[in-house]
Amino acid sequence: MTSTSFCDAFYPSFFADFLIALIGAVLGIGGAYLIYRISIRQIRIDRLRYLVSLIESSVSSAMRQAEFCNEHSKAILHKPFATLELRLQANRDTKRSSDKMDQEGVYNAYLWNYGRSEKSYREFKNLYGFIDYLDYLIDDIIKTNERIIEFMWQRKKEYQISFKKLKELIQALSVDDNTKSDRPEFVEYAIMSLKQFLDKEAVGENIVESYQTVVEPMRNYIAEKVKQHPKVTEIYLLLDELVGQYFGIELQARHNAEDYKLYGDALAESAERLNNGTIFPLFF
């Protein structure tokens, strides 16, 4: 009697405890799985939101950089001999979108949000195509800008070296008795032209001032009024070289202005395509 009572008391208690434990385990697993699913969903949402924020920032930054390029182009055309600096956007969100993000994770989140279809596959590919091209454009602008600065510096340096030679030749005329005797009017004119330039005490590169005050007037003076003479011919050949260098700088500056304008137009167009090629809003 005692044994039967013990079993009757034991088995219901055992199965009840087992059932409670089983239900608890199922609920625990289910809860963990639910939390996992919620977490995955939130990660995908966060990835897409971050991508959207980067795209919006990239579009805005690219449009500003386009304006900077167009403004720089106009400034160069207005002052082709001035040393001007292109304003550059510090924002590199295109680089973050293109290189730094987990593209596979973004891809899966994108398909999760928009569905797996040929349309969504194509749109994601196009989206990153726009991002990559915009990133390439910005990198290319920076590299091209550095090359332009270096190339223009070299051209201006060549002019300055040639003008220094001209200045030394003119200054040497004051102690050249042979040339002073044979071409006194030219010697006087050359020395006065150089003095007029030096009296201006111009600062900076002085390319325009030296050309307008010395190079162009003296070249015309020799061509129109001075007879051949070895020293005069030497100076005239150097003046010819300076004229070529001067117009070479101006022509290159105008080409540079056109390049900056093309970059500005390409940036604005690419930013617009990226903006229009992005699906907004995200539906979650």
Image (spheres, rainbow, N blue to C red):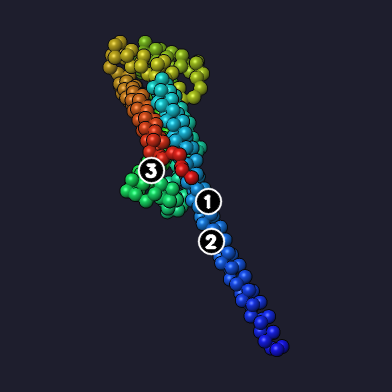
Q: Secondary structure at mark 3?
A: helix
Marks 1 and 2, the one that precedes in the sequence: 2
Closest to the camera, between mark 1 and mark 3, is: 1
For numbered disc 1, what is the local secondary structure? helix
Q: Residue furthest front?
A: 1
Across and down, in percent, residue 51 comes to: 47, 44
Circle 2 sits on which residue? 33
Q: Residue at x 30, y 18 (%)?
A: 229
Crowding at mark 2 (Cα within 10 Å: few <14, some 14-19, many 20+): few
Q: Position of residue 203 (x, y in %)?
A: 51, 22
> Which quadrant would the N terminus be assigned to in this image?
bottom right
Residue indicated by mark 1: 42
Earlier residue among tags 2 and 3: 2
Q: Measure the alpha-carbon separation of dots 1 and 2.
A: 14 Å
In this view, the residue in front, 86 or 81, is: 86
Left or right for 139, reference 45: left
Which residue corresponds to the image point at 43% horizontal and 51% vertical from the top-left? 112
Q: Residues within 10 Å of mark 1 (few under 14, many from 20)?
A: few
Is there any visible trace of residue 278 in the rendered image?
A: yes
Identify residue for label 3: 127
Q: Nearer the viewer, residue 248 or 39?
A: 39
Quarter of the image where one finds residue 191? top left
Please state which of the two labelled residues, at mark 2 or mark 3, is closer to the viewer.
2
